[in-house]
Image (cartoon, helix red, strand yellow):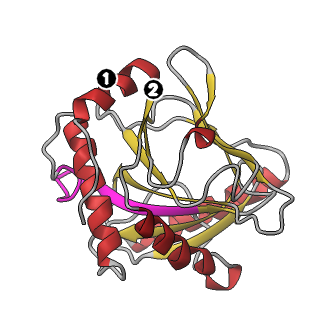
Amino acid sequence: MKLNFPKPDIFMDEVEARGFSIVKDAIPIDFIESQRERWLPKFVKKNVDKKFVRGNLILGERNFLSYSKISAWCMYRNFEFLWNASDDNKALEVHTLIHKFRNQMQNFNEDYGLNYNRENYGIYISTSYYPLNIGKLTAHTDGHKDVPIVHYMLPFTFKGKDYEEGGLYIKDTSGNIVDVDSMVDPGDIIFFDGRQEHWVDVVKSNKKEALGRLAVFAIPTHFISDSWLEGLKRSIDVYLKEILSSLGLIKLG
């Protein structure tokens, strides 16, 4: 698939200056529509495997679909790992091309993150769905040691059509709060510096045809070594956070 990417340095300059940049008309519309059809029916509670949506990931684990609703967030999130066979090779190709463009923006080797290094550093593909009138994610920042994170976000549903309020907000380098979702159209890609505070306000709409917020991004991270003990610790952590959050004793960010 051929994507419509301009020169990467132009957009990296804008990310450094503002904290984010939007590449317009980068992805074919038919791909966006096919991904809506692929993903929206999957995000129902009967398909959920786990309650884990944020935190450490284990090298070698299976793909899984999660749902979690606590004070800090409410969302479905599907995790796809590159060591597992993909059920949509076209989507994998698109995300690989976007990731290579992101690497070019940062002057990295274009395959950086596709082949895991000695620190188990690589990417995974995360598709997130924020249900109508409850979906949200608290304000936070992202970063890994000395490696800057430039996130990309490819929306599959759109503000003003599929939901009316809420969505992705970014605090730019000047401290202004930017309603990013209101700036994108089908086929656009959002690139932003993960070190800038960002969040998803509650996604709202009263329209019957509204769908909620659906978007995908490939996240660079350090995976932890495969271990049943690490998996057990993660499960305990998830349930402990749920309990403490429900009691109002912690606020996760």
Horizontally, residue 18 falls left or right of residue 160, namely left
Whether residue 115 appears in magenta in the rendering, the answer is yes
Residue 120 in the image, given as x and y percentages of width and height: 25, 55
In this view of the protein, which residue sits in the foreground, 49 or 104?
104
Residue 149 in the image, given as x and y percentages of width and height: 36, 38
Residue that extends furthest to the top in the rendered view of this protein: 174
Residue bearing mark 2: 19
| Label of residue 13 in the image | 1
In this view of the protein, which residue sits in the foreground, 195 or 119?
195
Element type where label 2 sits in the image: loop
Amino acid, disc 2: Gly
Quadrant of the rendering where the C terminus is positioned: top right
Element type where label 1 sits in the image: helix
Quadrant of the rendering where the N terminus is positioned: bottom left
Residue at horizontal 18 percent and vertical 49 percent from the top:
112
Amino acid, disc 1: Asp
How far is mark 2 from mark 1, CA to CA?
A: 9 Å
Q: Nearer the viewer, mark 2 or mark 1?
A: 1
Relative height, residue 86 to residue 57 (above, below): below
Residue 110 in the image, given as x and y percentages of width and height: 15, 48
Relative height, residue 119 to residue 226 (above, below): above
Does residue 230 appear in this view?
A: no
Q: Quadrant of residue 84?
A: bottom left
Residue at horizontal 19 percent and vertical 40 percent from the top:
104
Task: Give the residues in magenta.
Answer: 112-128
Residue 218 in the image, given as x and y percentages of width and height: 38, 55
